Image: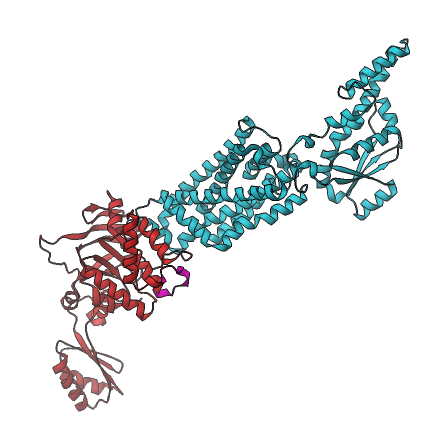
Chain colours: A red, B cyan
Amino acid sequence: MELLQGLFIPNISPTLNDNIHFMIKVENLKKSYGDVPALNGVSFEIKEGEFFGLLGPNGAGKTTTISILSTILEPNEGKVTIGTYDLKKDPGQCKRTIGVVTQEIALYNKLSAYENLMFWGSLYDVPADDLKNRIAETLQLFGLADRQHDKIETYSGGMKRRINIASALLHRPKVLFMDEPTVGIDPQSRNLIFEVLEKLHKEGMTIVYTTHYMEEAERFCDRIAIIDKGTIIAQGTLNELKNTGGLKESIAVTFLNLTDLVKTKIGTFLGGEFKFEENVLHSYTSNVKTDLSRLIIGCSEAGADIVNIEIQKVNLETVFLSLTGKQLRD
Amino acid sequence: MFKIAVKDLKLFMADKRAMLLTFLLPIPLITLFSLAFGGSGKSSEARPTILIMCDEDKTKASHHIVEQLDSLKEIKVQLSSLDTIKRWIGNGDEDAALILHKGLSDSMDAGKPLPMELIYDKAKEMQMGILMSALSGNLMRFAGTKSFEKKALANFDKQNPGMDSAMREGVHAMIASNFSGGSRDGGKDEPMLKATPMEAQKENSPGLVQAVAGTAVMMLLFSVAGLGASLLQEREDGTLKKLLFSPLSPSNILFGKMISANLVAMAQLLIMFLFSWLVFGLNIKQNIPGLILMIVATAFACSGFGIFLASVAKSRAQVQGMTTLIVLTMSAIGGSMIPSFVMPAWMQHMAVVSVNYWSIQGFYDIFWRVLPVTSPVFLMRVAVLLGIGLVLNFLAVRLYKRNIKSIA
């Protein structure tokens, strides 16, 4: 992988025509804490109804970005537009446009789910009757209607997380910020949340999603921005990220023993891009099917005993690793 | 902000432990302090204190003093010998005794200093302050006045040696009448007694007022500190951050907290006074507007203290530590634990910095001094409490706005 670092062409700009309406526009956002810079001119745009992933290692600037977009942190420089509202000039309207699902479960344990939802919904001045209807619908959606009058403290972690998400939807926000919404929950709750996310996405809600789970980002995100050290280092669709960076799939072959002579023989017939890491050969290819059989035959002829063969496809994890040098969960 | 207040009240009521601590815990404490500071009911119904006395003079005048003291509602005299008394006090069986030494009657006749002595257990100096305060006024009237009367008569006789006996008797009667409070019958001592006990004219026992007001304010300070800490709990639980995402302004969130803290504080005070009325007979009906005003002012000052504490502290653990230290200090110097009049003068001066002092004095104004609600003294105390509340709330808002930035 080290071989590939620096080859990726960063900052894949989406080709957008004039008819596309941006729900969020972030321009040259800068923020520092004392002398420590957190954001160094972050810019991106999110289309209406888009599911947008914001990925980055810890300390990259994700939380700072989300905090600014959700109005609780002021940037030092830059401009943010949410819908048609300028965040600086009209934070009140921006707050009514967005819903925020925080990583921590922010609910009142001594109150019931219904009381929690009534409270959080009432903060947005939703008329009482509408709010009651919306709560009923939302509880149904999250499969918790029968537990609505139980205190939150009696709920499992997954159920709490579902209510936590539900509480951010009652005022029908146009944009939903979700910060690691599936951390530490049971598969049943995770699947239910996924179903809700898909439904919201289908209904046209703009969703900004941060996660450490690559499979979630790959499954849901229309576009992804990768942020590191306060800078957006790449953004685009999953395919754009995979293809444009020059990343190739690789075949990893593990041998029982690998002498220098064998290495030379293998190197002679392989050609192309490859590298050895102890007893493992990494061969980079643009056509796994044809190269795999050639590789097996060549290795046998070179007298190498193959223990294991693994095909490593290009995915978000490898893109992320090549861009940041870190695993997403670092 | 009312939504925050309503939510906080719901949370408070959902927390049975907090409810018990706020409303029920003060009741046994009030009961304990009420019994300790003068029993239940009105002052006229209070159980008398046993006063150990030794009459070494054994004259008509000394008997008179003993009888007068014994006739007071608050005091029951128990006579004993000097040796026995000294043994009792030496053993710690009794705290103090009043000794009427030989020559008391002669000193009264001659207008000299009276040979009376209060001997007491040195370990009980604090109680002596209270006893001395209670006795000195009565003794001055029972013995001191008689002494001055005798001196006046002697001076008159000395300056008018040739006066006939009938006229002399008439003038003596007039002088005696003046010293006995205007009675035509100068030989009777009843008027002296009637003029003495201010307590008998009052509706409520000062001990009861002290116990109820002192305990109520102290417990209230503890309670509101806990309510203020709910702000820090919101911070720790992440709900404060979530509130900041909503259209509510940071100030509105804090004002909501203030409203709920005030409402709970007022409810707590009201319950404590209602309990004192029902169980100990504290007459809370004698000045209801004054009581309401003082409850509101006290609740405002105390809740300001709670919110201020929550704004200064960085965690709930810090609030707990600071609360214990500050509330106990304020309660000690402010007169919640012991009446401020028994404290040294410098401590009494320091008491004005505590919420407890102004509040307790305000409740004394209502229940003991029976001041009208329009009394400048009473209104001044209300104003001071409201002022304390305003300053603390103002500082809390400033600190909170500064700290809120770190939440993001």
Q: Is B320 positioned to the left or the right of A224 in the image? A: right
Q: Nearer the viewer, residue A252 or A242?
A: A242
The quadrant in which residue A49 appears is bottom left
Q: Nearer the viewer, residue A58 or A254?
A: A58
Going 73% across and 28% down the picture, which residue do you hit? B196
Residue A156 counted in the magenta span: yes
Going 37% across and 51% down the picture, which residue do you hit? B240
Going 30% across and 56% down the picture, which residue do you hit? A135
Looking at the picture, how far across and down is residue B330, in whole percent?
A: 57, 42
The quadrant in which residue B335 appears is top right
- Compared to B150, does A219 lie above or below? below
Going 26% across and 48% down the picture, which residue do you hit? A96
Looking at the picture, how far across and down is residue B381, in whole percent?
A: 54, 32
Looking at the picture, how far across and down is residue B130, in whole percent?
A: 71, 37
Looking at the picture, how far across and down is residue B385, in whole percent?
A: 51, 35
Q: Which image quadrant: the N terminus of chain A? A: bottom left
Residue B392 counted in the magenta span: no
